[in-house]
Image: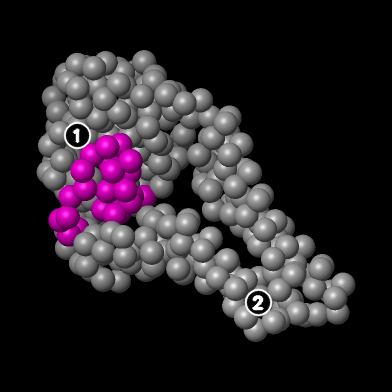
Amino acid sequence: MGEVLQIGPLALPWAPLQLLGAWWVGDALAQRLAARQQQVWGLHGWMLLLCSLIVARAAFVLQYTEHYRTPVWSALDIRDGGWSAGAGVATALLYLVFLWIRRSPLLRAAAVGIASALALWLGVQALRHAMLPSNIPLPAFAAVTLQGQTLNLEQLPAQHGQPLVINLWASWCPPCRREMPAMLQAQQEHPGVRFLWVNQGEAPETVLRFAAQHQLPPSQVLLDIRQDLGRLLGSRALPTTVFVDTQGRQAALRVGELSTATLAQQLQALGVSAAASAPPSSSTESASP
């Protein structure tokens, strides 16, 4: 099981699908138990989900406050996938405490629903981690940079002793364009990390023109006209970003748009110290073709 559910050209991330599935099961069980007790479950399930998501997002934003200062409204843009799972779970448990204090007759139904949803969600996460092999090396892959140099990706970490961030992108992909300012800023803040942009399926002249317009370093932009790297990594969705440790192992594979905050989160997991710079004010304007 990979990071996304691929249905033709549509790629859906597994994580939110699994969360919604677990919530649906827990909500259905709570409704059934409440009905047996001749109680109305009503909107409690939706309130639980909404409150948990709001707190999970708020906790993540507070943890990476410096990345959401400019512009402030970027904290509301949940496309970057920044959530604190622990805060969300704590909110659901606090909801149980609230019902217990009020001696609500729905306490038992809520407890069964929340426990079932958490057990299912945690079980699926554990199963996914068990099914995914650990310490996956980068696949053997060679590509030519815009400067005409051939790079063998799997050899780079050992040769240079630094982590890699490999971004699969295309100029026609809006999320790819939106996240590029965050990538360029992170490269400036973390000179010990090597960033590579591997273009998927576009003509060299198109990539050259786009790289010049958006100030992508030519030596770090690679051409993958046949889109082999996405196939080797098991993700044809764009953008896809692979985080590789100094041993050449895939530490994480992220499908979807990254903000400066979620990029900082992934780099911290890779062992790279966090940078406290604010995101560039041109994060949306400079991404337009």
* Disc ID at residue 193: 1
- Residue 289 in percent (x, y) is at 24, 51
* Disc ID at residue 271: none
Assess whether residue 262 is covered by the magenta stretch.
yes
Answer with left or right where residue 51 lies relative to residue 154.
right
- Residue 153 in percent (x, y) is at 28, 21
- Residue 242 in percent (x, y) is at 35, 34
Asked whether 20 or 171 is in front, the reply is: 20
Q: Measure the C-alpha gap from mark 2 to mark 1.
A: 50 Å
Asked whether 75 or 145 is in front, the reply is: 75
Residue at the spot x=19%, y=34% of the render?
193
Asked whether 115 or 244 is in front, the reply is: 115
* Disc ID at residue 100: 2
Give the structural element (helix, strand or loop) at label 1.
loop
Residue at the spot x=21%, y=62% of the render?
66
Query: From which residue to which does the magenta span run?
Result: 257-279
Residue 148 visible? The answer is: yes
Asked whether 23 or 210 is in front, the reply is: 23
What amino acid is labelled 1 in the image? Val
